[in-house]
Image (cartoon, rainbow, N blue to C red):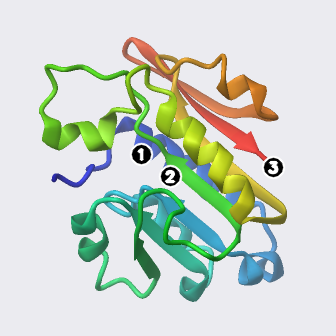
Amino acid sequence: MEIYEPSDDSFFFKEFLENFFSKKSTKEKDSLTFLDMGTGSGILALTATKFLKKENITAADINEKAIKKLNKQKINKIHTNLFKNLKNSFDIIVFNAPYLPQDKREPKDSQLATTGGLKGDEISLKFIQQAKDHLNKNGKIFLLISSLTPMNKIKKFSTKIVARKKIFMEELLILEFN
């Protein structure tokens, strides 16, 4: 199973987080707990290390290779399918979700990192439903999806678009839930 390497979506989310954290006071950042769900290469968790205490950062992924790749990092790591093995709650939860509709021509090895289900929204919907149970009071959930992802079910959750970026034939969206 391959590790999702940073791409346009990862770098867009990284820039968003840098901007988000730079607006927080040092005192506030010292106490924030952070979960990078579906960490892949670890780019978002590693971005958080520039602003937050490493012991307050958790990287989670269904891909054991992704977790092992982060072994040298002094952050918490957990192998899990979404929140299955997580007991903690967090102030900030981020997920650069696999958001593309299933394409049977895509190799099975890369589908785990790119395919969000038959229609593309299934994993994001499961994440949103489960994340609420792991969010601290006044916490925030940030989910990156694509304009290619069906939005009708996602819109039923209280959400707002906090960032957007047009690339190629799609638009990347970062949604905030709280």
**Badge 1, how many Cα within 10 Å: few under 14, some, many 20+?**
some
Q: Is residue 87 left or right of residue 177?
A: left
Residue 9 appears at what percent x and percent y?
43, 38
CB atoms of marks 3 and 2 within 8 Å: no
**Badge 2, how many Cα within 10 Å: few under 14, some, many 20+?**
some
Residue 76 appears at what percent x and percent y?
47, 82
- Inspect the image, locate mark 3, and give the three-letter code of the amino acid beneath it: Asn
* Disc 1 target residue: 10
CB atoms of marks 2 and 1 within 8 Å: yes
The answer to whether residue 114 is seen in the rendering is yes
Q: Is residue 138 left or right of residue 79?
A: right
Residue 74 appears at what percent x and percent y?
42, 88
Q: Residue pushed farthest top? A: 169
| 3 w.r.t. 161: above or below | below
**SS class, disc 2:** helix
* Disc 2 target residue: 14
Mark seen at residue 178 = 3
- Name the quadrant containing residue 70: bottom left
- Inspect the image, locate mark 2, and give the three-letter code of the amino acid beneath it: Lys
Of residues 79 and 29, the one nearer the viewer is 79
- Name the quadrant containing residue 3: bottom left
- The residue that appears at 43% across and 19% down in the rendered structure is 119
Q: CA distance from mark 3 to mark 1?
A: 22 Å
Q: CA distance from mark 2 to mark 1?
A: 6 Å
User: Which one is closest to the eye, mark 3 or mark 1?
Assistant: 3
CB atoms of marks 3 and 1 within 8 Å: no
Q: Is residue 92 left or right of residue 69?
A: right
Q: Residue pushed farthest right? A: 138
- The residue that appears at 73% across and 60% down in the rendered structure is 133
**SS class, disc 3:** loop
> Which of the two labelled residues, at mark 3 and mark 1, occupies the earlier sequence position?
1
